[in-house]
Image: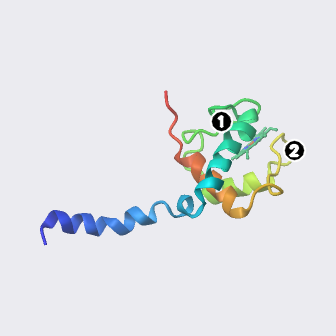
Amino acid sequence: MPLRTFRALALLPFAVLAVPAMAEMSPTRAAELEHMVIQDCGSCHGLTMKGGLGSPLTHEALDGADPGVLATIILDGVPGTAMPPWRPLLTDAEAQWIADYLLQQETDE
Ligand code: HEC
């Protein structure tokens, strides 16, 4: 086997492992969630997530944040602030998807 082919095969498992959470959502639900992030979350956090009433949610602002912690904030809100709990509208997996989505967004500037 040529060395190059071998290298490509060796990297394959990592490529697959890198996107588990995003891959689990159906494309329809993923599109709905993306719409929700822009419309609903964007109404406070800014359409481009750069902040408004709520803090910026760009991946730079969230850099280093733990996706599990973000998902919990999304589900339970931040008591004493305008950040509402989204648990009535989202499953755990969906909140996790949004957390991963926010962390993976590139801000185009
Ligand atoms: C009614 C306004 C409002 C809406 C709608 C809203 N948020 Fe927030 N959110 C806030 C505010 C205000 C804060 C800042 C709380 C604080 O001061 O710590 C916040 C904080 C957060 C944080 C923590 C950020 C950090 O740096 O600690 C995350 C994550 C977050 N919101 C995600 C979301 C997502 C995802 C949605 C949509 C599903 C959403 N928010 C919708 C007002 C809102």
Name the residue beneath numbered marker 1.
56
Image quadrant holding the N terminus, namely bottom left
Name the spot of residue 57 as percent of width and height, x first: 64, 40
Q: Secondary structure at mark 2?
A: loop
Q: Quadrant of residue 11?
A: bottom left
Instruction: Measure the C-alpha gap from mark 2 to mark 1.
Output: 18 Å
Q: Secondary structure at mark 1?
A: loop
Name the spot of residue 86 as percent of width and height, x first: 79, 52
Question: Quadrant location of ligand 1?
Answer: top right
Name the residue beneath numbered marker 2.
80
* Residue ranking furthest to the right: 80
The total number of labels drawn is: 2
Which labelled disc corresponds to residue 45? Answer: none
Name the spot of residue 36 as percent of width and height, x first: 71, 44
Residue at disc 1, CB closer than 8 Å to ligand 1: yes
Q: Quadrant of residue 16?
A: bottom left
Which residue sits at x=65%, y=36%?
56
Residue at disc 2, CB closer than 8 Å to ligand 1: no
Query: Left or right: 105 with respect to 29?
Result: left
* Residue ranking furthest to the left: 2
Residue contact between numbered discs 2 and 1, judged by CB atoms under 8 Å: no
Q: Is residue 62 above or below residue 19?
A: above
State how the image is colored: rainbow
